[in-house]
Amino acid sequence: MIPSSLLILSSLVQAGLCLFSVHDDLLAFPQYEIQFPDLFVTPSEASAILSQNAPGASSMANDDNLATYELMRLRDRSFLCAIPEVKPPPPMNATEKELSKVEEEKELARATSRGWELLSDLEGKCLYFVSGWWSYSFCHNREVRQFHQLPLQQNNQWPPAEDPETQSYVLGQVSPEATNNPMEGTELQATGELRYLVQKLGGGTVCDLTGKERKIEVQFHCNSHGTDRIDWIKEVSICCYLMVIYTPRLCNDVTFLPPRDNKANGITCREVLTEEQQEDFSRRKAKQEQADALRLLEKAAQQILEPEEIPKGHEKQAAVDNDDTEEAEQTHEEKVQQLLDMLEL
């Protein structure tokens, strides 16, 4: 399976890119990343490695660092690819599975309770979101409304004021029975490794098309950048809505923190080169290194040539300083000239 994938994906070698993010397929295991380092092997070295990799061949490698090798071809180029052998975690017995399930249920209950506790500071507050003709308000533990706002005044008032001449809609509200139990209708959900809190609200304005009350699902996601805000809202089906709220409050519990980037298992592919091809490879590598060095010099020269910003109110002082620094300016110009001379090499 892996070799065929390599054949399909190896065309990206010319772009020199990593092939995919490890989060592209959350269900894939193990996860791999094909890498093309700036290295090569000779045909004899490749043959020796492949012969050791043949079925029945003895291996002197450490069992913890095993890899299989495949020779892959892309047009007229050959690559020797090392595929790491990833061992799955040991299976759990029935007792371990039962204990794991119990612990998971306890943790989910704790995180749900703790998450709602962290959101309690939103009590009595409303968040607003403007999207074209419609504006939306989310008032914590009360309701979600959709309305048309009055034309903005010169002072660009906030929050947006509701236009009384246009009909508004309640997309969902907390039922009176849930007032004493605000966690009712709240649960912790997960997408891959990402966990978030969900509140489902019904009892909205009756929909003309379905004859049923509008309802909405509100998702609370941890986001440490900025303040509480409605990120987006969408009508996922007729008179059924989904709202996503970003809040730094949930980030105070490790359960809701976004997953760390997992390092994928690297499949390393080195090009197989003859002696003649190695000479061409060395020339191309030296040319690339020279081009990289020139880019760094150009960047350094640009930074030196850029004029320094002078804060307002300091122009006169800057003029006096310039009169006293002619010698320093000459040194500056000499440095710039040296850089330019190097760029011409």
Image (cartoon, rainbow, N blue to C red):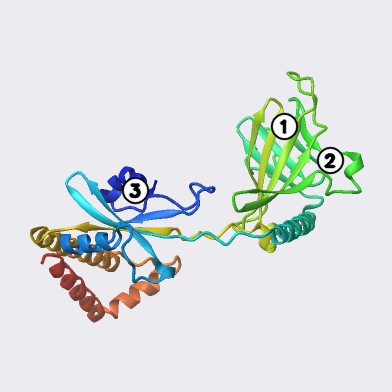
Q: Residue 13: where, in percent of width, then height?
A: 27, 50
In space, the residues marked 1 and 2 are separated at their CA atoms by: 19 Å
In which image quadrant can residue 115 be found?
Answer: bottom right
Find numbered disc 1 in the image and state the secondary structure of the residue it sits on. strand
Front position among marks 1 and 2? 2
Q: Are marks 2 and 3 in contact (CB under 8 Å)?
A: no
Which amino acid is tagged 1? Answer: Phe
**Rendered view: 39 above or below 246:** below
In which image quadrant can residue 85 be found?
Answer: bottom left
Could you tell which of marks 1 and 2 lies nearer the N-terminus?
A: 1
For the C terminus, which image quadrant? bottom left
Residue at 26% x, 59% y: name it: 50
Q: Which residue is mark 3?
A: 3
Q: Residue 283: which numbered mark, if any?
A: none
Q: Which residue is mark 2?
A: 174
**Rendered view: 212 above or below 40:** above
Q: Residue 187: where, in percent of width, then height?
A: 76, 48
Q: Residue 147: which numbered mark, if any?
A: 1
Q: Residue 263: where, in percent of width, then height?
A: 46, 61
Q: Is residue 161 visible?
A: no
Find numbered disc 3 in the image and state the secondary structure of the residue it sits on. helix
Could you tell which of marks 2 and 3 lies nearer the N-terminus?
A: 3
In which image quadrant can residue 205 be found?
Answer: top right
